Amino acid sequence: MSRREAGASAVLALLLAAPACRPGGDAAPGRPAVLRMLVPANERPFWLPLAESFAKARPGVRLELEEGPVPTDLRESLTTSALLSRDGTWDLVYLDVTWTSKLAAAGWLLPLDDAFGEAERAAFLPQALAAGVFRGRLYRVPFRTDVGLLYYRADLLAAAGIAPPRTFAELETAARRLQSPPERWGFLWQGAQYEGLVCFFLEVLHGHGGSWIDPETLEVGLDRPEAEAALALLVRARGAGGVSPPGVTAYREEETRHLFQSGRAVFLRSWPYVFRLAQREGSAVAGKIGVLPVPTLSGAPGSGTLGGWGLAVARASRQPEKAIAFVRHATTLESQRLFCAPTGFAPARRDGYADPELLAANPFLAELGKIHASATARPVVARYAQASDVLQRHLTGALAGLATPREALAAAARETRALLGEAP
Amino acid sequence: MSTVLARRARLERALLLSPVLLLLALVVAVPALRVLLLGFTRTELADGVVTSWAGLATHARTLGDGRFLSALRNTALFTFLSVLLEVTLGTALALLLDRSFRGRGALRAVVLVPWALPTSVMALAWAWIFHDTFGMANDLLLRLGLIEAPVAWLAQPGTAMAALVVADAWKTTPFVALILLAGLQGIPREVIEAARVDGAGAFARFRRITLPLLVPSLVVATLFRSIQAWGAFDVVWVMTGGGPGGSTETLALYAYQSWFRYLDFGYGAAIAVQGMLVALLLAAVVVRLASRREEA
Amino acid sequence: MRRPVAAAFLALGICLAAAWSLLPAAWQALTAVKPEAQITASPAVWVPSPPTAEHVRSLLERKPFGRYLANSALVSLAATLLALAAAAPAAAALCRMRPRARSRWLLGLLLASLFPPILLLFPLYEGVQLLGLVNSPLALVLPYAAFGVPLATWVLEAGFRELPREVEEAATLDGLGPLGRLLRVQLPLAAPSVAAAGLLTFIASWNEFLLALSFTTRESSRTVTAGIASVSGASLYEVPWGQLSAAIVLATLPVVLLVLLFERRISGGLMGGAVKG
């Protein structure tokens, strides 16, 4: 090594060592017990007030919130590797509605039946609570919920004298009459190959009277005529002369929201969070939108897909009572206010929908409460993630025109049965 | 006497080699055997993760699995395209660096930079470059008049794969260029000079003399890179996550998903093993070619 | 007539090569210091005016980025030292072997280094869990050292073999054993090769992502490649490209410096391996 290089290495070593010398980090003396939980980085600021109020309510226990990646898939893998290691890294798990079954089936979550009795359970939206029950035991307590909705441009419909649509046919007719592509499209939905597509497809499927997987009997209904009709509707919407842009097969929530919010669509299928953002100052459609339950074939109010996030306790936690105490604390009305008022997320507690404080922050909640009552959960089966990926792949194949709806669904049904048969 | 010495020499050699062997056994050999075994098991989720012997049943699942076939196809396409691009660009770069000009040392350092950057981190950078509305790629292409409207690179199957290939080629071209440069420097100058005296043009000299003599290096670079590209994970995971619509999902991603999302450990191992068999086949070719060279 | 044309081609080639290598990184560096409004301007604004340190500051405020960098440095350095410590005696043994046996060993090492880490991920994870090493730096140090050791052995062996044979014989006559020869003679004389092998292992370890992502579940033990995956802004729905770019620049700066300073060693190491392969 030459002298120049030796000098350079010394400089480099210093550069590298410098950050290590900075004080701080989490080397604080560990007197209070520490509970750990992973939350998406963008939600962390909204969790902090809850951690503070918990520290006040329960001195001696501190909740440490670790920032995880924002994309749900990444956090799902990270959560899995942490739970798989069973080293008690995280005491609490902040989990999507669809993760419950597999994490519970793997035996990584603590049953919470004893901690949450009948009276306590009754405080939650029944569907949201039921989504946390796997093989008869409660593993996940709902924290915030989501439900699929149909947004529409009230101003455009009123001007044309069209009543808000209740059936698929009315929706299609209205969308076709009011659209002028490519400036304004009739109907936007999430068509990219991901979980959002499954959520939307299930609403259309249920609206046609069909079903995907019966969680009890594991019966698969994808190759029935109702399912074919449902998928054919989506294929037609996106096809030539349809009411949805061809690019819809690449859209997730945010792409559709941006288009709708800039006034470039008549109808949008999405989640409650859109309402607040679309009504905000600066939105091109502020004050011009309305919300409906998703449509059905018959015109009866449809049932939106239930989404949302909940809390569970890791079985490997060395302090389960304290973790349960936090779950209880986070799901009080007080905490729901702290979290839902600034974010606009929908609370999981029933009284949240009638709470003056929350209603003041988000008047839309009153309407949302009604729509929530008919929400449908996705099937709680241990192999949910795989089943969903199978369905996504074949839906996309049909939307791209690689297969007819009948072929695509027959293949999906076959693969799903094989999957569910494989793992009883 | 001599046998004692020979035995001592052998013992000494074994001792000197043991740390490397221990490390490789611990981190490569034992896990490789373990994953091989795991591929013959079935994973069930029933009040815990239950593993049972399944013989070939788990491996057989790939046969009826459209997603496995599509991942295999994507892996092969990604490997082929990125290696093709890397070797082409790497050859050009090596020829350039083989010339003598002022500032050659500086250029060599600059050109090596992409190779040294973390793939996962630069994949984030590439996702930003290929951003549909604010990205550099669209801006440059629009300014040059090569496209008329912004392209949503990562949202369409074909362009997403193209973006991955470019990002991967950017990172690994320097490696290919260095191997080829070493090959070029091994070509005797007199041979090329003689051709020049005979009146052969630059292109003819390259085609008739340089290229044939460079073939061994090209083969080594191609196979080395093919095996690495076959197992590529970081760039795909960060840039597209296998999407859109699974069009860029590689075997590595599928195995990862099976392990860490589906908790289907046996099947993940079966995917990895079947992928590994192809990689091993490639490796066997490398070894054959390399050992033939060594003997020649 | 031909000369100026050739010179122009050469100049063009040099410019293209430099642009291809630097533009993507430069675009990132520019984004990192661009005011927010210029990041999302269309058509794109290339040169930030005025440059801002806002993104770097808010990144360091929100993330223990120094911790990530320090973890990466620690893990990579430890892996490098371990790899060198294992590779040096092996290289010494190899360079004394007969050519046939030696090339067989070297090819075996090559084969081991070609295993894509993804194949080993799950069993390695099981091992890490079994040994209780989740979130411990050792969980990364051992695999990184193992991944780096084949190439390090190749480079060191090439370096040792270039040493004059008499030096080693003289050392033997002085009564030095194999370890003494290694420490007193071979390593000091082959210092450039040691540097090359070390740099290659260090860079590879710094850059590793898959294991870092899976074996560190806690913020305080994440390395920079894993930590960067969870960079996000304070807003719920927007990707903070400015902060992300700042993070990318900070994570890559150390290796960029290494390459610019030690290009000759690194290229020499890679090319040395290639020449013999």
Image (cartoon, coloured by chain):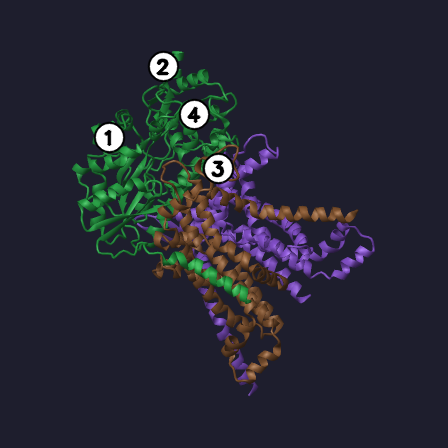
Mark identifier at residue A163: 2
Res. B61 visible in picture: no
* Disc 3 secondary structure class: loop
Distance Cα–Cα, label 3 vs label 2: 36 Å
Could you say which is closer to the camera, residue C232 or residue C216?
Answer: C232
Q: Mark 1 points at which residue?
A: A358
- Residue that numbered label 4 is attached to: A262
Q: Are labels 3 and 1 assigned to the same chain? A: no
According to the colouring, which chain is brown? C
Question: Label 4, label 1: how many angstroms apart (C-alpha)?
Answer: 27 Å
Disc 3/disc 4 C-alpha distance (Å): 27 Å
Residue C149 position, x and y percent, is 50, 64
Chain displayed in green:
A
Q: Residue B222: x percent and y percent?
A: 62, 53
Q: Which chain carries label 4?
A: A
Q: How far apart are marks 3 and 1 (CA)?
A: 39 Å
Q: Is residue B281 above or below residue A240?
A: below
Q: Could you tell me the amino acid type at mark 2?
A: Ala
Q: Please check whether the numbered discs 3 and 2 fall on a single chain.
A: no
* Callout 1: SS: helix
Q: Name the residue under label 3.
A: B245
Q: Is residue A215 left or right of residue C187?
A: left
Dot 4 amino acid type: Ser
Indicate the chain coloured purple by its letter: B
Task: Write down the chain letter for disc 3.
Answer: B
